[in-house]
Amino acid sequence: MTANPPRRKTGGRQAQITVADIEREGLRLGLQNLTVNGVAAALGVSPTALYRHVDGKLGLEALVGEALLRDLQIADDPEDGIKAHLLSFAQQVRDFVLARPGLAVYMQSLFPRGAAGVRLQREAVEALGRRGYGPGAAVMLSGGVAALAINLSAAEERHRPYLEGAHRRELEKVYALLAADDVLARAQAELPQISGEAYFRMVMTACIRGLVSAAAPARPVDDILGELGFKPTQP
């Protein structure tokens, strides 16, 4: 399958482009490498031509980010209890965003930013509704789990170059610093090597257990928030 050729100016006039053209080239570049100039160059037009369709860099990011999120479908096993469901939800989010560099940072910035994000949030609330939770508690539980999953995934994405060779020397400096400290060296000797995926599951499991222990399905949202340390501001 051959890629669509870039559009070129003809007869001194700017070639016509569509939102679909911009989305296609944005997806090809990926969120991590996305720029207005890069998409414009790929389409053979000036950056000004893109501004007729998207609101600058943020609008371009939203267009591409939402296009990616349209493909995220969270599988929900009806046999899973609340803890298993939330852990599966978190794992599916992690796997999806790590396969699409830049998407975790996009979701960190502001969420939801479009119809795809709204659909994902609504489906998460509906999945918890099937397990006895009202909308408010469901938003709190699913939102907390999703936020931690996305943040951990973004950190893992940033850390990958140090593990995969690009910045391996810097990681070796960290190991040397730890080995030179008596207390930290003993601590490191007691700990096994833990993969990024295993660490993710450990942290998510601890978070989910804490949230679920405070959030019984029929418990009022104010009581849940209070147990988790939330203190409303006085008017």
Image: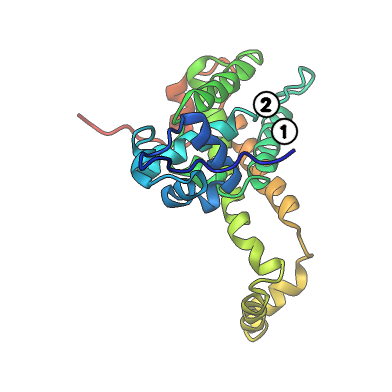
Q: CA distance from mark 1 to mark 2?
A: 12 Å
Q: Amino acid at mark 2?
A: Gln
Task: Point out the tag, 1 or 2, that comes first from the N-terminus.
Answer: 2
The image position of residue 123, as x and y in percent, is 59, 19
Residue 88, disc: 1
Above/below status of 155 relative to 82? below
User: Which element is circle 1 on?
Assistant: helix
Q: Nearer the viewer, residue 181 or 76?
A: 76
Task: Give me the residue at 59% from left, 18% from top.
Answer: 217
Q: Are marks 1 and 2 in contact (CB under 8 Å)?
A: no
Residue 73, disc: 2
Above/below status of 89 relative to 132? below
Task: Give me the residue at 71% from left, 77% from top.
Answer: 186
Q: Is residue 138 left or right of residue 36?
A: right
The image position of residue 116, as x and y in percent, is 53, 25
Task: Give me the residue at 47% from left, 30% from top.
Answer: 19
Viewport quadrant of the N terminus:
top right
Q: Is residue 101 left or right of residue 51?
A: right
The image position of residue 134, as x and y in percent, is 53, 14
Give the quarter of the image for residue 141. top right
